[in-house]
């Protein structure tokens, strides 16, 4: 029986595309999901990744059909010229898929089954629209009735009602996400991670094109509720079957306080310390813990926060010790709940949650979002010289996933490792 210590999983690099509008007019619409992954793979190789050392590619994707079917992880590795020996694996936990892809990579590294894995996610919502898989959770009347399946936006309004959040609070959060994203782009905080992608006309798209810097609570207050029609069409009745104490659901979320759908991809390089040393890669952070949780399938959007609490409890870390929370903005009500429960007082200047804006402002590319949360968290920890960071996402049907990363004191200002 081996007495070798269990290897740790380290993050060595992170790249992502800009996020494009999920429409035919979007800057990434001319590219398939595989195109986006190949683009990032090519960049990782140019940055010094020895692709012959890569043991696997693991990608998250929420709608794995048509152009996003038949294992894009394997196809992209072949098209990127990484050689025939690099396999590929796809995972799907709805919007949490990108985090789970990174967690799978870390688990394989910690188990000693792989030394170097590229993990992340991709989604081209403009080309493979949401719900296009026509899965039973969306389309089978017996499943919908049996589970009480409702649209995520109706679930967001349900959560706002259960928590007692007002329309004014939701709009204030939505405006703040936009302002933080605009400020982060203006300050060049995404320069190291974003790889520009040519538009259909050949001009490069180098920024997240959904950011609206002029957004204010007043402009958001003028928007109509986005999910009242779905509620009136029977979904409120489904939700109230589980929560009859409410009596009715007031629909408060708008397109300005919901995650904006986007196209995009993200990749992280995960491996053992020794594999990174052999490859000449700089360790950025250790993957300390990962968790996937499930909660009430109708309320659904609270599971990401539950996963955060799980990884903190597992590691003995308190919310106060976390320097950065990258929490996917699955509607404003859930973000307000997260801040309240984690003791984050944004009104007093505590900007540890989504300090650079979030998916409400920059876009939600379903399968890629989790990887963007983890990678962005590592980048922000380095800027803050922080130790602990968390990336988390809530998904449909009451699913959620989180990863806790640690940037120990052994990292110097250049990102090199001491010791």
Image (cartoon, rainbow, N blue to C red):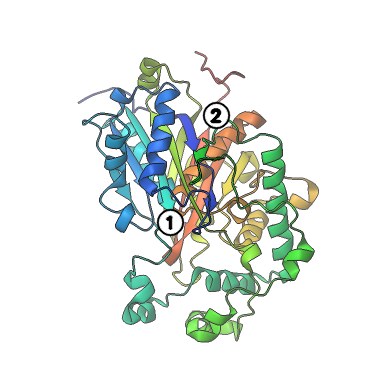
Vertically, is 173 above or below 116? below
Question: Which residue carries the number 1 mark?
Answer: 293
Question: Which residue carries the number 2 mark?
Answer: 407
Q: Are marks 1 and 2 in contact (CB under 8 Å)?
A: no
Judge left or right: residue 168 versus residue 284. right
Between the C-alphas of marks 1 and 2, the distance is: 25 Å
Q: Residue furthest front?
A: 201
Q: Residue at x 50, y 85 (%)?
A: 233
Quarter of the picture containing the N terminus is top left
Judge left or right: residue 273 versus residue 325. left
Q: Nearer the viewer, residue 313 or 42?
A: 42
Q: Position of residue 288 (x, y in %)?
A: 46, 36
Q: Which mark is residue 5?
A: none
Q: Nearer the viewer, residue 314 or 30?
A: 30
Q: Residue at x 57, y 59 (%)?
A: 259
Q: Nearer the viewer, residue 312 or 347?
A: 347
Residue 143 quadrant: bottom left
| Whether residue 127 is visible | yes
Q: Position of residue 262 (x, y in %)?
A: 51, 54
Label 2 sits on a secondary structure element that is loop
Q: Position of residue 26 (x, y in %)?
A: 53, 54
Vertically, is 409 above or below 41? above
């Amino acid at each position: 029986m081996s007495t070798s210590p269990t290897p740790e999983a380290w993050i060595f690099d992170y790249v992502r595309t800009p996020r494009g509008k999920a429409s035919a007019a979007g800057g990434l619409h001319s590219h398939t999901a595989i195109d986006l992954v190949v683009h990032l793979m090519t960049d990782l190789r140019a940055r010094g990744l020895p692709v012959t050392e890569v043991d696997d590619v693991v990608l998250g994707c929420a709608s794995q059909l048509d152009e996003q079917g038949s294992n894009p992880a394997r196809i992209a590795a072949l098209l990127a010229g990484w050689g025939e020996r690099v396999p590929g694996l796809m995972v799907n936990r709805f919007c949490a898929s990108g985090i789970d892809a990174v967690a799978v990579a870390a688990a394989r590294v910690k188990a000693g089954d792989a030394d170097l894995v590229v993990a992340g996610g991709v989604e081209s919502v403009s080309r493979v629209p949401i719900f296009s898989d026509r899965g039973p959770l969306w389309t089978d009347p017996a499943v919908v009735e049996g589970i009480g399946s409702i649209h995520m936006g109706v679930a967001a309004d349900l959560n706002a009602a259960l928590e007692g959040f007002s329309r004014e609070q939701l709009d204030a959060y939505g405006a703040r996400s936009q302002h933080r994203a605009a400020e982060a782009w203006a300050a060049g905080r995404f320069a190291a991670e974003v790889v520009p992608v040519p538009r259909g006309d050949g001009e490069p798209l180098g920024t997240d094109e959904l950011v609206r810097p002029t957004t204010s609570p007043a402009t958001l207050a003028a928007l109509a509720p986005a999910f009242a029609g779905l509620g009136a069409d029977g979904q409120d009745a489904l939700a109230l079957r589980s929560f009859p104490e409410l009596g009715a659901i007031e629909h408060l979320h708008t397109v300005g306080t919901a995650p904006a759908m986007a196209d995009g991809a993200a990749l992280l390089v995960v491996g053992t310390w020794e594999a990174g040393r052999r490859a000449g890669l700089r360790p950025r952070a250790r993957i300390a813990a990962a968790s996937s949780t499930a909660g009430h399938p109708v309320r659904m959007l609270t599971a990401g926060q539950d996963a955060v609490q799980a990884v903190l409890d597992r590691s003995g870390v308190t919310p106060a010790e976390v320097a950065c929370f990258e929490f996917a903005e699955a509607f404003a009500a859930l973000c307000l709940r997260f801040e309240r429960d984690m003791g984050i007082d944004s009104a007093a200047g505590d900007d540890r949650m989504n300090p650079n804006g979030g998916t409400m402002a920059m876009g939600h590319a379903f399968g890629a979002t989790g990887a963007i949360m983890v990678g962005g968290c590592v980048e922000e920890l380095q800027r803050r010289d922080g130790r602990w960071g968390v990336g988390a996402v809530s998904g449909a049907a009451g699913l959620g996933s989180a990863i806790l990363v640690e940037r120990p004191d052994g990292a110097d200002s250049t990102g090199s490792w001491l010791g």
